[in-house]
Amino acid sequence: MNNSFISHSGIVQKINEDIVEVMIVSESACSACKSKKVCSISEMKEKIISVKSDHQIFKIGDKVNVMMEEKIGTYAILFAYVIPFVIMISILIFGYYDKMSEPMMGISVIAFLVLYYLIIYLLRAQFDRKIIFKLEKQNIEID
């Protein structure tokens, strides 16, 4: 079975026992555009990802690739975006047919989404076991 990976390059920021914290730069699709300085739509964010090291030796400042299986990325997107969207639309449709007032529908959507994300937060240990990142040192070639 051939697994494909999502990979981001990053820099090791901190090392705690067997946990390595890596800073990656997340860029929007238009960040490579030549007009991004005047556009103000492009977006770049620095993110810190904690990765359990698999007995590799890393130093602060090492350039690494943070990898995750593509199917796990799909799993994460499903729980972070798709399910909440379905919950929100379902509540709005139910509220419409039940002749609920708009403010009440809005409050219901917010309440259910808060509850959903609270449950996701409480189940984070199970997600941590399922969503696994891997680190790989970048090979720097000197010509």
Image: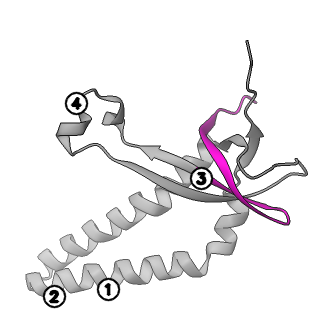
Q: Amino acid at mark 4?
A: Ser
Query: How far across and how far down the image is residue 135, in percent?
Result: 74, 45
What secondary structure prevails in the magenta region? strand
Residue drawn at x 80%, y 50% is 59
Q: Residues within 10 Å of mark 1 (few under 14, many from 20)?
A: few
Q: Residue at x 65, y 46 (%)?
A: 11
Q: Nearer the viewer, residue 95 or 49?
A: 49
Provide the residue span drawn in magenta.
1-23
Q: Secondary structure at mark 1?
A: helix
Q: Give residue 111's mark.
A: 1
Q: Which residue is under mark 4? A: 35
Residue 31 counted in the magenta span: no
Q: Amino acid at mark 1?
A: Ala
Disc on the earlier residue, 4 or 1:
4
Disc 4 to disc 3, how far (Cα)?
Answer: 26 Å
Q: Nearer the viewer, residue 21 or 85?
A: 21
Amino acid type at circle 3 is Met
Q: On the image, which quarter does residue 36 sit in?
A: top left
Mark pair 2, 4: CA separation: 43 Å
- Determine whether label 4 and label 1 are within 8 Å by CB: no
Disc 3: which residue: 23
| Amino acid on which the number 2 mark rests in the picture | Met
Note whether 109 is above or below 135 in the view shown. Answer: below
Q: Residue at x 69, y 73 (%)?
A: 125
- Quadrant placement of the C terminus: top right
